[in-house]
Amino acid sequence: MVTVGELARAARAAFELVRAEQGVNEVEVFAGATAHLLTRLCYTSHIPCNGVEEPKSTGEHGLGLQVVFDHPDGPRVGFGSSALDLGPEGARTALARARAAAVTDPHFASLPRPTGEARALDGYHDPALMELSDERLVEAGWTVVRGALRAFLTSQRLAEMAGDEEELARLGLILGGDVSILQERMALVSTALPDVQTDESTRLTASTTAKVESRRAKGSGCSVSTRLDHLTDEAGVEAALSAIGAIGGERVSTGDYTVILGPQPVADLVNNLLVPACRADAFYAGTTPFLGRLGRQVAARSLSAYDHGAHPGLAASRGLTCEGLPTGRTDLIRNGTLVGLLSSWYQTERLLRDPAGSVKLGAAGRAAEQALVPRNGFRLGDGGGRSFAARPGVAATNVVLEGSDPESLEALMHRVGQGLYIGRIWYTYPINGLAAGDFTCTVVADSYIIRDGRRAEPIQPNSLRINDNLATVLNNAIGTAGDRRGTVVWAADEIIYAPAVAVSGIHVDAIAGFMDEVS
């Protein structure tokens, strides 16, 4: 992988080359290198398997240029990139593409300028993850698989069903998933940020699904961290125990229930609904359910949410945005009130200059400026980390959801009394447009009925769908647990740190009976 020093030198050389070109008014050079290392987990007790598949990796490095060109009709802005070549030819290729793509943008104010905030996070990446060998990546996969197998083989419940080891295999014990490492390096220099700035970040995640196939029982597990020595077998053990606990699942009737949403469902709803609703570009376009509600109550007063890209130890932290600006904490909802938005430099400047901006936000002047500090301008692929070939957009980092008076999960269930615990959902989509707040998702694992304040029968996987509205989830929250944990959502770059949340009046629909056979 290209070193951060090589990226810094390439960024400086490209900057000097491009700014000397005739007609160039401003230039921003982003030099980036990103690698994604992956080992697939595939254990099946009744079919020959490898347990851990061979390691795989993807990587890229190159230059991305944003250039402001002089033009008789006014400045024109273009973006161009060049892969693999960090030298002069790569810079010239990216410049030619930026020139060819240049357009007049009436919303463009300038390339990013210093915000007055200081960088809070530096030297935080794990060198062991940055230099990880294939052998150590495979061993990380086996750490998770061994944890799941140990949980399966020591389960008294499975032993009673099987009687012997051969019969145990016929139950169809399955573990799938992956252990994934993200490595990022970047350097940036621009007309307004003339000193080369660099950043290095690493992230380790494990995502697993376990099944007892003959009993149509499924469970899941995950873990996130920033360091290799923090990896444990937690994701495998959790998935196996959840699958065992799901044996004998029952169907639930259509209706409105008091529901405890576990950390994974909360994370999925935050990722697919709350985060998009709290982006500055959604307010500009009028596609958010919170339009015009900055400074107003949008959730139960017990709920707060914030994004923190510079929190030491959180998995998606980075020292700098891909615009060269410091990351930091942006409060989104504080005690139920919408107080801030995720934004990039471009989106902040565009919204503050919009004649209808105060109406779209519901605030103006200093209040609007404080809500739109650009701490979230990132160039990202789809769940693949920073990409030199992308223009800066708006993205979350570590999103933290918390309650004002957390309690144990047992106490929360006791307060619910009769209801449902939903532990894992998937295919979560906003329907009728994001602004409506309506959503749908399927309950797929880790769920059970709450009866008399205690865990009762498991819910059959894929037999239940939630159809409701984001406002119901936010406003009907009646309590939160204290088990806040990091959860990775499929194809998402941000990590959600969320507890279990109890919500009243959630509508669920039973899925037609033919789905009983789907595991």
Image (cartoon, grey):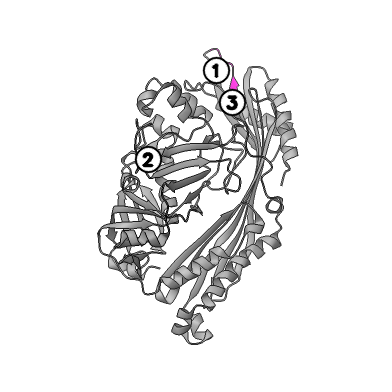
Residue 454 in percent (x, y) is at: 35, 67
Q: Amino acid at mark 3?
A: Gly
Q: Which residues are magenta?
A: 67-72
- Within 10 Å of disc 2 (Cα), the crowding (few <14, some 14-19, many 20+) is many
Describe the element under mark 1 as helix, strand or loop: loop
Q: Helix or strand or loop: what does disc 3 sit on? A: loop
Q: Is residue 315 above or below residue 113?
A: below
What element does badge 2 sit on?
A: loop
Name above or below for residue 498 compared with residue 109.
Answer: below
On residue 116, which mark appears? 3
- Residue at the far bottom: name it: 163
Q: Amino acid at mark 1?
A: Pro
- Percent position (x, y) of residue 510? 28, 62
The answer to whether residue 486 is left or right of residue 326 is: left
Q: CA distance from mark 2 to mark 1?
A: 42 Å
Observer-nearest residue: 479 or 208? Answer: 479
Residue, x 70% and y 63% (percent of image)?
Answer: 135
Of labels 2 and 1, earlier in sequence is 1
Quick check: can you spot residue 351?
Answer: no
Q: Is residue 378 magenta?
A: no
Q: Cα distance, mark 2 to mark 3?
A: 28 Å
Which labelled disc corresponds to residue 336?
2
**Residue at which label 1 appears:** 75
